[in-house]
Amino acid sequence: MRSRPGAQTENVSSAVGGAAGESALQDGRVIDLHCHILAGLDDGPLDVAHSVEMAQQADRDGIHTICATPHIRHDHDVRIHELPDRVARLNAAIAAAGASVRILPGGEVAETIVEQLSDPELAAVSLGGGGKWILLEPKPGPLSATLDHAVVTLRQRGFQSLIAHPERHLCSDMLERLALLVREGALVQATAATMFDPPADRGMRVLAAAGLIHVLSSDAHHPRFGREVAVAQGLRVLGAVDPVSEHLPWVRDIAPAAIIAGEDLVPPYLPTVTIRPPDAPDHERRGS
Ligand SMILES: [Fe+2]
């Protein structure tokens, strides 16, 4: 029998959830839910000095909290039981460097590994240690039914899914697939830089206009290579797209704070996608 998820993280959750939300709402600083900031674990920074540089980059962008989300995947030897100590040591190094961002636990959990993780392991890599929300990485290639299965499996075990960067898993029926996952209670995380980086930006605005982006995160891996630890510019672009424009505080502040607190969330907008019946011919099953 599986143990009750979240039990070991209740203290973390109660200590950070409400305070984080209030802070975000009051000072305009935000939470980055997806960042490979822990050193020497996956394809992120090699040493703590680079992790600290990433934290300083986050400070400059107005990020006050980062969920450290190493890959929980077969091709990376990330030992979940070591993560709390790694997070604590990084927080100490960041404080010693004079940066103010704080690091919370998390993980980017591959859809292919969900069934092999125990409930306590899933709780340990839940976003913010809140015990509820799993950053779920689709397997390489187009979104497929295996992702749907992982979302349902997680929900049956008491967890909810935040789908990581669907823009990296293009498929002809992506809008419809994501709309179905949202109907199952999942939310969608997009990569902030794609909102303004061509050629992805046009497609991202389509995704946003369909009501299928709920949070933006950096998904940064290094302070000097690739994407920066930054979400502000992406939020400005996303905030100009309907229906997000009327709900930017929810996207920017309320949803990330609730996710790290392990709270249930209902998006303030529904996907504007026509979901086709499963036996309809292709030309009738196209999303609008
Ligand atoms: Fe990632």
Image: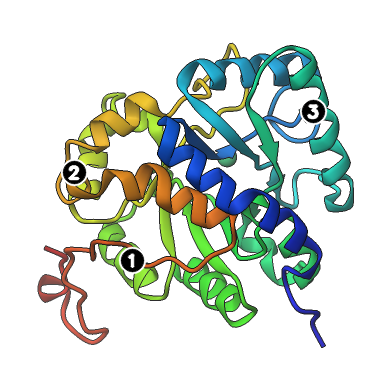
Q: Which comes sooner in the sequence, label 2 or label 3?
A: 3
86 vs 201, nearest the viewer? 86
Q: Amino acid at mark 1?
A: Arg
Secondary structure of the residue carrying numbered label 2: helix
Q: Residue at x 71, y 13 (%)?
A: 98
Image height of 177 relative to 225, above or below? below
For the N terminus, give its image quadrant: bottom right
Q: Is mark 3 within 8 Å of ligand 1?
A: no
Label 1 sits on a secondary structure element that is: helix
Does any portion of residue 129 appear in the rendered image? no
Q: Does any atom of ligand 1 lie closer than 8 Å to the CB of label 1?
A: no
Give, as a three-letter code, the residue at label 2.
Ser
Residue drawn at 74 percent across, 31 percent down: 38
Which of the two discs, 3 and 1, sits closer to the camera? 3
Q: Is residue 246 left or right of residue 130?
A: left
Q: Secondary structure at mark 3?
A: helix
* Label 2 close to label 1 by CB (< 8 Å): no
Q: Quadrant of the C terminus?
A: bottom left
Which residue in the protein does label 2 denote? 245
Q: Residue at x 65, y 42 (%)?
A: 69
x and y percentages locating residue 11 in the rendered image: 76, 58
Image coords of residue 70 (percent x, y): 70, 41
Tell me the distance, in whole angstroms, between the alpha carbons under discs 2 and 3.
35 Å
Q: CA distance from mark 2 to mark 1?
A: 23 Å
Label 1, residues with CA under 10 Å away: few <14, some 14-19, many ≥20 = many
Labels 3 and 1: the sequence-earlier one: 3
On residue 283, which mark appears?
none
Q: Is residue 175 left or right of residue 51?
A: left
The amino acid type, in three-letter code, at marker 3 is Leu
Residue at the disc numbered 1: 177
Residue 90: mark: 3
